[in-house]
Amino acid sequence: MISRKLFIYSLSISGWLLCAINVFAQKPAWTEYEDRISMFPKSEYVVGFNSDGNVSSNEADDIQEELLEYARIQLIESINVTIKSIGTLNITNVNTQTHEYFKKTSASYSKVSLTGLQTETYYDKKQKEAYAIAYAHRPTLVKSYVNQIKKDGETISRKMQSAGNFYSKGDNQNALKNYFETLPLFREIEEAYTLIIALEGGTISEIEKSIEEINSYKYTVNEAIANIQQSNNLNLSDLAYMMAKGYQLQTNKPSRPIRLANFTYQDTKMTSQFSKRWGTLFEKMLVDVADYPIASASADSYYADINPFKETATTDSQTPLYIITGTFWEEGEKVRIISILRDIETGKALASMEGSMSSQILSDNNILVKPENFEEAYSELKTFAKDDISGSELIVDTWTNHGEENLIYTEGETMNVYVKVNKPCYIRFIYHTADGSKVLLLDNYYIDESNVNKVYKIPEDFECTGPFGVETLQVNAQTVTFSPLNVRNEYGYDFIIDDLEEVLANTRGFKKKEEVLLAEKRILITTMQN
């Protein structure tokens, strides 16, 4: 668990800045809640909306641009929540096979910008109120992603044919290069498929035939790569070398550093002992074999003066423009690793590699693939996913000195926590430890108008100690005070007596009331011994 030593606070919000459309005519109907839901019914549109009062005419343009940023964040995050819920709870109207495929495809999903997004802003001079809305038509979005899947499938087919021609001539190098170039296209298709199911609430028959064909392509490509590289019986070091070599063949040496994230178990976003062992080995191979400049994953400067949903390119030659993320999957007696190199700013997959090895090798070396408390942590994950909060004008963000995703802390390490909000609100901070305890670290901490959009470092640090496993940082924010939780004080900490469902019901209790804004952010952390 992470125990407290001195405690810090901060929040970070992020999003893609879009050009504001100033409207000085009659006040648009969409500024009113009832009119907005009538104009943009949930079944037809995805919508993000934000507003602010007491805005002077001198600051109206800047505030509208900021509100538009928040509206887009809200829209994207609502889709992210849907994707997580579908993957965790199987709430969509699809069969088991399709749902399992969705879980695997959604694991590669990145916060990419949506096509066809429209925006509007309005400033009411008389009332000194500013408004912004971002919206997209669901059927139009779905159609664009269906077309993208078909187009990428055709490109993959052509590259496979070229690869086959090179292989038949004994040119294994160019055969491999063409096969490798299909891998980021598979990732692109997976993201498009993920978005289609999230937007539709289920799959659509129009695309199923294409998906089946693309799955057969993927099997053929993986078999061909394994055959050329003779990579059917790899150990961990061999697999890391093979994947690093694949990246070298797909890309030129980047001129800017690449951030290597900890790989996570299947679609859970949980890390494990394997994550740490693989990360150390793969980083070495990326440097030695691919000649990649790997940057530290520390987040001490990761969020400095930038938005975490979109990193802004700078002239600093040490600022990473790319990131490698990945997942690992138990498939019978094998463990398959899937990795993706992305442009941080756009989220576009630039290269991808995958490969598998015998799970017996990991077992023989006492390397755990799953986190130590996986069953308990996954059960908690499903409880969190029920009635998850999304679509609020209030946005809260939280991160640590190691970032906000794929986190690993080892015994003795210190964790710092930061929080940022976009509106005045009350904060509740709960830490869920590996042994099932729930510690109320902060309650009804008020962030006033003067501290909105400022980074707070929580005034305590946390030291990593046992018990070890997956733990959760839960931060809730709302515009009214929280109802009290039942706690008992031990060793200077307030331990929550209520079970998790009671805690969530209490914390999310104002969800139905429009006048009360609320938001939630959770971070998964894996703690382990050195």
Image (cartoon, rainbow, N blue to C red):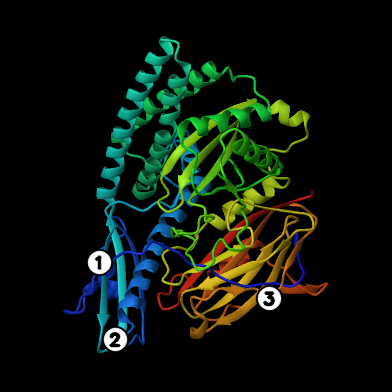
Task: Name the residue located 57 percent from the left edge and 70 percent from the top edge.
Answer: 419
Helix, strand or loop at disc 2?
Answer: loop
Task: Name the residue located 71 percent from the left edge and 42 percent from the top edge.
Answer: 273
Please rate how many residues cluster around mark 3, counting C-alpha atoms within 10 Å: few if below 14, some from 14 to 19, many from 20.
some
Query: Is tag 2's residue or tag 1's residue first in the polypeptide sequence?
Result: 1
Label 2 sits on residue: 57
506 vs 407, nearest the viewer: 407
Image spot of residue 328 (x, y percent): 59, 37
Label 1 sits on residue: 38
184 vs 371, nearest the viewer: 184
Label 2 to label 1: alpha-carbon separation: 30 Å
Quarter of the view holding residue 488 = bottom right
Q: Quadrant of the N terminus?
A: bottom right
Dot 2 amino acid type: Ser
Label 3 to label 2: alpha-carbon separation: 37 Å
Dot 1 amino acid type: Ser
Question: Residue pushed farthest bottom?
Answer: 126
Image spot of residue 153 (x, y percent): 33, 30
- Residue 249 visible in the snapshot: yes
Q: On the rendered structure, is 474 left or right of 176?
A: right
Q: How many numbered tags mark residues here? A: 3
Image spot of residue 452 (x, y percent): 49, 79
Task: Name the residue located 48 percent from the left edge and 30 percent from the top edge.
Answer: 249
User: Mark 1, mark 3: which one is toward the viewer?
Assistant: 3
Q: On the rendered structure, is 272 left or right of 254?
A: right
Label 3 sits on residue: 459
